[in-house]
Amino acid sequence: DLRSGFVPARVADLTLPGALAVRGTGLPDEEAKRSEDEGTTLSSDKSVEEERNPPVLLQGQLVESQPQGRLATENWRLIANRNVEERVYDGVVLPSDARNADGSKRWKGKRTVAIAAILCLIGAAVAVAVSLSRWRADSNSGTGAMGQESTSPLPTHFPSQSVMPSSRRFMEDELTSKDIEVLFGDKVNEVGSPHAMAMEWLLNEDPRQLNKASPNVEQRFVLALLYYSTGAERWTRANRFLTTEDECKWYGVSCVDGIVHFIAMTQNNMFGTIPPELSKLSLLQRIDFSGYGMSRSTNRLWGTIPTSIAKLRNLVKLSFSSNNLSGPIPSELGQLTRLRELILSNNRFSGSIPTQIGQLTELQSLFLDWNSVSFTLPNELYDMKNLTAFACNQNSLSG
């Protein structure tokens, strides 16, 4: 359309650098002449030709019109042949969908991009296949990250919110200071006390990080309390105490089915008071905190015997000999009906021997020597048929 300044044409040849010669009809001379002679339209051949060599758009303006035979002599002049005259145009080639501005075809670049995209997709598919193969191999031959057998298939979707562990559930299970306070009273809030130190360790330092549902919260706390109450920094032996090890493997502690049954800390340089919370170890059968003499490793416990000890109804041995315990012998000890050995010698106990001792029908050994016990022996002691060893010398007894 010459009026709009655009000339659809086919590139024929380059007559001079910067000039393109085109035929306005879009047909070579020989094809046009043959078409006139034969009276036929070359529409089908033209379509094939256009597919191989699509037309381009040329934008320019008419400069001059000359008889046939004159060539373009200025840059970017376009010669349009109408078989009558030559028209000279100044202009530029406009890129089409199929060609660049220089006339080169664009489809090659698109094909390259398409091939590259296909190769990328193939590579991604191979990578996914390899990952799946490795995952299936690990699932069939190994265990999961937590040491449990991995048998579940690869999930195909994200779990719903209802099956995912929530932070709320975690907070509900978390062991808190309130939980410890409920179990052991207000003493856990006394800054610097053995109870407060035991709670701090259990909540923030214990490598096991128990939750409130853990079955060994109480006994782990009680043993930590014993540690802080009796100057564990001076203990002769404290192997594995307050470590990640199970408390049943701590020094002096013995268990049955994970429950503490025996605590023996003889000659371990214990220095402090006996925590009443030992009564929380309800299945405890033996307590032996004997000091035995004047060695550097002897124990130096002071204070009184907690009356709560009487709650340990499974106790068969109770030994606090060679310490600095004082006060009266608790009458509540008469409730330990399974007790076989009661060894309290070489302390500073005072007062009288409680008559409730006579209720210990299973008692075989009773040692009260080297104390400050006074008054007469209770008649109930004479009725203890299983008592085979008795010592009460170095006291202020009469009768």
Image: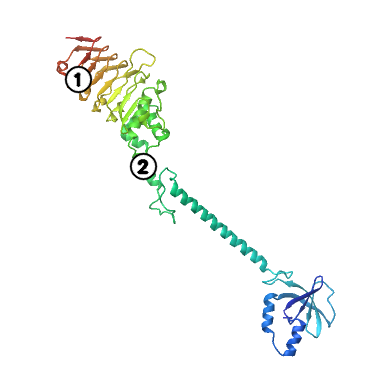
* Residue 357, label in figure: 1
> Residue at position x 68%, y 82% from top?
45
Position of 347 with respect to 385 (left or right) is right
Q: Which is more N-terminal, label 1 or label 2?
A: 2
Which of these two is toward me, 144 or 165? 144
In the rendered structure, the answer to whether residue 125 lies left or right of residue 1 reads left
Out of 161 and 366, give the one closest to the viewer. 366
What amino acid type is highlighted by mark number 1?
Answer: Ile
Crowd around label 1: few <14 · some 14–19 · many ≥20 (10 Å): many
- Residue 17, x across and y down, in percent: 82, 70
Residue 184, x across and y down, in percent: 32, 32
The picture quadrant where one finds residue 325 is: top left
In the image: residue 381, left or right of residue 125: left
Question: Residue 228: x percent and y percent?
Answer: 38, 25
Q: How is the image coloured?
A: rainbow
- Secondary structure under tag 1 reads helix
The answer to whether residue 195 shows anywhere in this view is: no
Are the two marked residues, 2 and 1, in contact with CB atoms closer than 8 angstroms? no
Quarter containing the N terminus? bottom right
Note whether 25 is above or below 250 in the view shown.
below
One can see residue 234 in this view: yes
Give the CA separation, mark 2 to mark 1: 45 Å
Which numbered dot is residue 173?
2
Q: Residues within 10 Å of mark 2 (few under 14, many from 20)?
A: some
Q: Amino acid at mark 2?
A: Asp
